[in-house]
Image: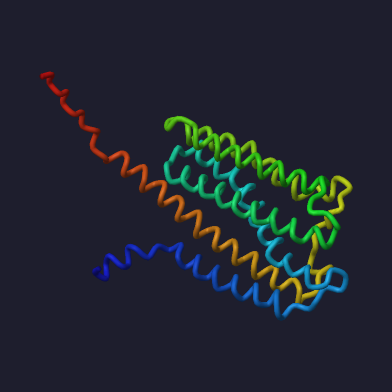
Amino acid sequence: MTTANAKRTWAWEHWFGLAGLALLVAGVYIGLFVAPTERNMGDVYRILYVHVPLQWNALVCFFGAGFVGAASLWTRKAWVDGMLAGVIEVGVVLETAGLLSGIVWAKPTWGVYWAWDPRLTFTFVMWLTFLGVLALRRFAEEHRRAPWTAAASIVASVNAPLVYYSVNWWRSIHQMQSSPETVHTTMIQPLRINAIALFLICVWFVARRARISLARRQAEATAPPPRIAPAESGA
């Protein structure tokens, strides 16, 4: 492989992926071995150093899907549609991991794996809604796939602010949003590091997904039409 070809294969998003991976390793290490033990929850609280960044970035993806969906409808560009698919898919993966990690944390903390309080309920609905968007995209006809995905994403993104503000608007067993004034510096540091790390990794995944989608469309557009085999003559 020549030097010119090597440079072309090293896309800009790889730097985001590498930086995110390095930060994630650092953040997990600090959360597990450096941050102090929480007074009430003990060491089980350390799963929050992964759970909370997962949920933060899932909300960013799902809320951002509304804006990317609007951009897709406005521009009708294939790469914007690919980016929208990436944002939704990454958001669903993050939210799935966030729900599972929350269940692991809830049992020793609340005594139950799941409670239908406002935040958990809205989160579950949001997750199901975007799964529905992916299903719609999967089964929609080719010429309708992009606009239908964009329109459905705009509607589904309304769930994101409902999830975020639900603990303020309704009574909930889920804790309210924390701030630097309510969390010790040694505990908030790994939260921030992991949140930034996952965001950078999300950028890498979304960019790669958009490239794959665009390359697939270009390949389909340039592929020769299928050849019809001649009919076999009877004996």
Q: Quadrant of residue 3?
A: bottom left
Residue depicted at x 61% and y 42%: 130
Q: With 208 as the anchor, is 33 left or right in this view?
A: right
Q: Quadrant of the C terminus?
A: top left
Residue 6 in the image: above or below residue 148: below
Q: With 165 as the anchor, is 75 left or right in this view?
A: left
**Where is residue 59 shown, x and y percent of the image?**
66, 51
Q: With 232 as the anchor, is 22 left or right in this view?
A: right
**Where is residue 55 shown, x and y percent of the image?**
69, 56
232 or 64, nearer to the observer? 232
Residue furthest to the top in view is: 234
Residue depicted at x 50% and y 57%: 205
Residue 233 in the image: above or below residue 12: above
Residue furthest to the bottom in view is: 34
Residue depicted at x 84% and y 62%: 109
44 or 165, nearer to the observer? 44
**Where is residue 186 shown, x and y percent of the image?**
76, 77
107 or 51, nearer to the observer? 107
Residue depicted at x 25% and y 68%: 1
